[in-house]
């Protein structure tokens, strides 16, 4: 059954798939399926790593059952299509929290493993994969393996950050974090320049579990890198009389916005207003975890404000501040408009994943409305700066990096390759491995 | 704590309801035909907080077993406060047209077996003078259409049956809730690739069903917008309706 309705979060590129919705673990009889396969969770990856044009997507959202929970240790075993939102709804009232969460809670456990996602606590706790104790992996030869640091260690390390290429994860066991309250003590500090970022960040990393900064990408010259620095810790207790509520996002974008909505003017206005919204140099508040971790989740499908042409995300990690300066200079001069520019430092805690993206350094994430060639050229220029400094790009946010960039980004690639299931592939993978699509389709 | 039995407990809609009940710490007894899947559902409900979950695998097309199944649930739970009858099959109308035995089978599962279960539950609750019986019918039962009149007829029969039962049990303090979902994104509709805006998520449908049972409603459409839609569809004169390709 052809299904043209599946898109990634950036809505670029477009793809057509056969889809196979899985509702039960026993339906994962991969040896009986034809063509090239790929698991697909919530499709919150921006580019083409969750797409498999011309092939089959195994839709995992129906695999959303809990299997076991140990209230004393906080170890949760659940199916791979369970979303982080479902885990929060279950765990928060019981005094637990996700060990690591990306900037949206609408991702599946399988997707969080396959991209080895990171959050605002990377400097303190590392990636999601570090809290995955074991999982079941189904491969196209019909085997089901339990993978952990002790058992099938190779498959374990390859699958964490493995971009869905090693097979289908059906369930996983995760270590949750016990927290004193679901509220966050947040401080936001105004940064007048990039120097401010590094100074505040140095002061903050020891005592604050969560840190991130928003940058006004249009500021130039002495103001380059100005923005707002956020840091947070779990509040020691819930403020009296305040409760956490759960539910679906209230707001939705009803249709694709016309292209002018994201014009240069609106981006400038947004950045200006956002920076100047905070007048005092430091603001402190105790807020629920939702607005702290998931400000974007408040609007259901905000990606539609970028219109039919979609958006391109770009996220790198580099080890030196000079490269960050160079990147920001190029971006601010290009004036291509970016609402959400996020800067953070990654810590040194290592992930078990072979292709894990985070590594010690500074990570910068930008988004651009897809304006065609000019946007692609700009991103190529940014890639070159990253390549020069020995940095890496994040596949979860990519729709266009070159094969060379991919290889430079992941030195452990040769160790990973033997674990790629020959019947699993993605649009991303064929692009960065320069696979002739026709040839692969014929042999599969 | 309520004591709740669910027939067709592996249904996506039934699971959504059961999760809410588990979160409220109700005791559950599950009946379906696939033991392995029932076990997965039971495990999930236990983690979510149900103090007691038991299950029994049996094909509900087997009417002989119904009295025993209801008895086992009653025994295991120590009485039944709520019963949800959720099992059903959609079937491919084109196939049912060619192979009439398949059509009869569809009517057997969707109408006869559900009516039989309702009857056993009704007799038990009537005696006890209390309880709620909820049954999942469908908007498809509101009017026969060429694209699925076998399924629609069975659901129409089920709606009428439930209405009669409600009338009979009124004086015994037993409520009967007829649930008429529109399109829901579940394994039953997995063959429809492009889900339009009329499709509801099973979680939303589950919340609406549990609310209707809490409030002992008579007939509910879920989501509610189906009530006016079906009113319009029912109001079209047959001489026009028969020409439409629905
Ligand atoms: C608003 C927003 C903010 C974000 N913030 C962050 C952030 O702060 N940090 C970060 O790291 N990421 C972030 N992301 C990216 C997102 O966390 C990842 O792309 C995540 O992997 C998406 O999960 P998903 O369930 O949607 O998976 P999909 O996008 O559907 O799939 C992602 C990959 O996982 C694989 N996969 C999915 N399920 C399985 C399975 N069961 N078995 C095997 N492979 C599987 C797929 O094949 C694919 O390769 C953000 C995304 C958005 C939209
Ligand atoms: N989805 C919709 O759009 C929609 C719309 C209106 C009404 N409904 C009604 O909603 C109810 C639930 O359906 P759903 O959407 O949740 O689909 P579903 O997930 O496919 O559930 C149907 C369930 O019925 C069970 N079943 C079928 N025949 C059975 C039998 N002979 N014995 C025991 N169990 C049997 C199936 O068990 P197995 O898993 O073992 O096959 C399955 O669990 C059904 O009554 C359906 O008619 C659905």
Image (cartoon, helix red, strand yellow):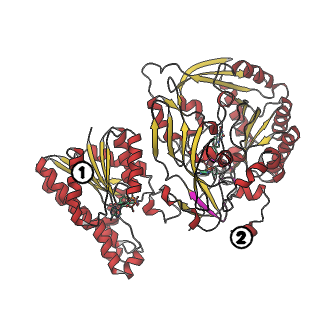
A219 or A354: nearer the eye? Answer: A354
Q: Position of residue B113 (x, y in %)?
A: 26, 65
Cα gap from disc 1 to disc 2, whole angstroms: 53 Å
SS at badge 1: helix
Residue range of the region highlighted in magenta in the rendering: A44-58
- Residue A46: say if magenta: yes
Is A201 drawn above or below residue A306 in the view shown?
above
Q: Is residue B139 left or right of residue B73?
A: right
Point out residue B28 in the picture as x, y percentages from the top left corner.
Answer: 30, 46
Q: Residue at x 60, y 58 (%)?
A: A6
Q: Nearer the viewer, residue A159 or B174?
A: A159
Quadrant for the C terminus of chain B, please: bottom left
Q: Is residue A1 left or right of residue A227?
A: left
Q: Main secondary structure of the magenta part?
A: loop
Image-quadrant location for residue A342: top right
Is residue A250 at least partly visible in the picture?
no
Judge left or right: residue B114 versus residue A195.
Answer: left
Disc 2: host chain:
A
Q: Is residue A362 above or below residue A394?
A: above
Q: Which residue is mark 1?
A: B73
Task: Report the image quarter containing ligand 2.
Answer: bottom left
The answer for which chain carries disc 1 is: B
Label 2, on which residue? A443
Residue at point 49% right, 55% down? A25
The N terminus of chain B - image quarter: top left
């Amino acid at each position: 059954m052809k299904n043209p309705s599946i898109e990634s979060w950036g809505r670029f590129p477009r793809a057509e798939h056969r889809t196979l919705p899985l509702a039960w673990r026993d339906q994962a009889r991969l040896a009986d399926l034809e063509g090239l396969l790929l698991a697909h969770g919530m499709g919150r990856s921006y580019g083409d790593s969750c797409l498999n044009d011309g092939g089959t997507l195994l839709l995992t959202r129906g695999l959303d059952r809990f299997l076991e929970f140990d209230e004393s240790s906080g170890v949760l075993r659940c199916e791979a299509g369970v979303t982080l939102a479902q885990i929060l709804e279950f765990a928060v009232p019981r005094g637990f929290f996700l060990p690591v969460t990306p900037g949206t809670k609408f991702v599946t456990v399988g997707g969080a493993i396959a991209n080895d996602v990171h959050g605002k606590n990377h400097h303190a706790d590392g990636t999601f994969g570090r809290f995955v104790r074991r999982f079941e992996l189904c491969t196209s030869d019909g085997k089901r393996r339990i993978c952990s640091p002790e058992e099938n260690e190779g498959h374990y390390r390859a699958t964490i950050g493995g971009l869905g290429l090693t097979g289908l994860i059906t369930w996983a066991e995760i270590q949750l974090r016990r927290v004193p309250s679901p509220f966050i003590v947040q401080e936001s500090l105004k940064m007048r320049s990039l120097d401010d970022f590094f100074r505040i960040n140095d002061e903050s990393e020891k005592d604050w579990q969560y840190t991130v900064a928003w940058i006004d990408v249009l500021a130039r010259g002495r103001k380059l890198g100005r923005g707002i620095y956020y840091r947070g810790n779990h509040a020691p207790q819930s403020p009296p009389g305040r409760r956490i509520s759960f539910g679906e996002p209230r707001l939705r974008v009803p249709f694709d916005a016309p292209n002018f909505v994201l014009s240069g003017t609106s981006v400038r206005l947004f950045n200006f207003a956002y920076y100047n919204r905070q007048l005092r140099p430091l603001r402190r508040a105790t807020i629920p975890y939702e607005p702290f971790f998931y400000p974007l989740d408040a609007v259901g499908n905000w990606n539609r404000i970028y219109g039919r042409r979609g958006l391109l995300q770009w996220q790198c990690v580099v080890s030196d501040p000079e490269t960050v300066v160079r990147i920001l200079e190029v971006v601010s001069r290009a004036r291509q408009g970016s609402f959400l520019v996020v800067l953070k430092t990654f810590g040194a805690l290592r992930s078990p994943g072979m292709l894990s993206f985070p590594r010690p350094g500074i990570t910068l994430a930008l988004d651009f409305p897809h304006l065609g060639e000019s946007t692609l050229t700009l991103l190529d220029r940014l890639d070159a700066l990253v390549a020069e400094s020995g940095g890496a790009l994040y596949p979860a946010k990519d729709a266009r990096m070159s094969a060379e960039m991919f290889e430079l980004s992941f030195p452990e690639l040769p160790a990973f390759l033997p674990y790629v299931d020959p019947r699993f592939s993605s649009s991303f993978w064929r692009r960065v491995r320069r696979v002739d699509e026709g040839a692969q389709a014929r042999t599969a | 704590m309520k004591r709740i039995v669910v027939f067709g407990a592996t249904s996506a809609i039934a699971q959504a309801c059961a999760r809410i009940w588990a979160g409220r710490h109700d005791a559950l007894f599950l009946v379906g035909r696939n033991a392995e899947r029932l076990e997965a559902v039971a495990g999930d409900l236990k983690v979510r907080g149900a103090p007691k979950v038991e299950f029994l695998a049996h094909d509900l097309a087997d009417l002989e077993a119904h009295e025993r199944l209801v008895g086992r649930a009653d025994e295991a739970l120590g009485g039944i406060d709520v019963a949800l009858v959720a099992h059903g099959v959609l079937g491919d109308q084109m196939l049912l047209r060619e192979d009439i035995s398949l059509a009869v089978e569809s009517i057997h599962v969707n109408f006869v077996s559900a009516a039989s279960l309702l009857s056993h539950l009704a007799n038990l609750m009537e005696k006890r003078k209390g309880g709620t019986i909820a049954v999942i019918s469908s908007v498809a039962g509101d009017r026969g259409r060429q694209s699925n009149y076998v399924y629609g007829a069975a659901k129409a029969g089920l709606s009428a049956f439930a209405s009669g039962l409600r009338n009979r049990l009124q004086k015994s303090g037993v409520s009967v809730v007829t649930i008429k979902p529109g399109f829901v994104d579940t394994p039953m509709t997995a063959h429809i690739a492009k889900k339009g805006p009329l499709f509801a998520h099973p979680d939303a449908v589950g919340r609406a069903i549990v609310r209707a049972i809490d409030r002992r409603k008579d007939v509910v459409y879920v989501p509610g917008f189906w009530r006016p839609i079906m009113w319009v569809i029912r109001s079209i004169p047959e001489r026009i309706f028969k020409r439409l390709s629905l």
